[in-house]
Image (cartoon, grey):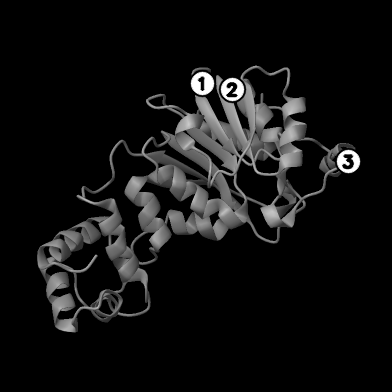
Amino acid sequence: MVPPAPAQPAEAMRRLGLRPRKSLGQHFLVSGGVLLKIVEAAGLTPNDLVVEVGPGLGALTEALARWAGRVVALEADRELATALVRAFADRPNVRILHADALKADLAALAPPPSPYSVVANLPYGAATAIVRRFLETDHKPERMVVMVQREVAQSMTARPGSLSMLGISVQFHGAPRIVGYVRPGSFYPPPKVTSAIVRIDVYPTPAVAVDSEARFFALVRAGFAAPRKQLRSGLSHALGIGPVEAEGGLRAAGVEPTRRAETVTLGEWSALYASATEAGWPL
């Protein structure tokens, strides 16, 4: 049984002399039921190493420590990190670090080739950047179970017709699915938005094979630079190529030039990348 989060988070923060910091997007999870759902979605075993981002008051950290072999938690708030070090001093399998997940040396947290998972209630403002950083690092996690804003979760898991740059980026590296939605009242202080738990099963190799991820995503970014435009005109403008050249490359890839970027599948982007490379497009 996963222990519930602190029943009185406001009191706990007062005892520590702390208060939630809006600049860090701090909304502390206070629902034991949601904690249980996150841990169950992660499917942890005593052999697992877990990296947690933004442990806050340590409720999820405590649950993870009971199920996983080791937990490394990164807390950007120095005062909270100091308080957590004291709180988990008697838990040898928990390591608290004062660090920013967008700057920390990820390889040092989980040295290759050791497998690891990322399980976290992410700060809203940095959630997409943190997810992409872990997915794009050389030593990727096997899975990620993260709490994000509902709209971000829906973008990550979108199907063709509603795809975005974020959806393509996540689905290039793994298979995302929404585990469940979380009401604002499950947090302290309550945010103004609904949240969602997303599990991403990370692929050993990307979903499509490309010779350069950087150049592939340069093409995708160009396609989404003006998402409401037809691809023919959007790519022409973003890449500085002629409309006829853009249309030729799209047709060679089997993509109708009048389509919009949100409708293009990963496989079609891969075909278009091959076509663009052959045509010498500036990527």
Camera-side mark, 1 or 3: 3
Residue 105 seen from this side: yes
The residue at 30%/76% (across/down) is 238
Question: Badge 3: few (under 14), some or many (20 or more) residues near its Cα, within 10 Å?
Answer: few
The residue at 65%/17% (across/down) is 92
Between 50 and 177, the one lying in front of the other is 50
Instruction: Report the side of 250 relative to 40 (left or right).
Output: left
Which mark is on residue 11?
Answer: 3
Residue 68 seen from this side: no
The disc, 1 or 3, on the residue closer to the chain's N-terminal end is: 3
- The answer to which quarter of the image holds residue 243 is bottom left
The disc, 2 or 3, on the residue closer to the chain's N-terminal end is: 3
Q: Is mark 1 on a helix, strand or loop?
A: loop
Q: Quadrant of the N terminus?
A: top right
Instruction: Kindly identify which residue carries mark 1.
Output: 45
Q: What residue type is labelled 1?
A: Thr
Instruction: Kindly identify which residue carries mark 2.
Output: 67
Q: Is mark 2 on a helix, strand or loop?
A: helix
Q: Do the residues labelled 1 and 3 touch (CB within 8 Å)?
A: no
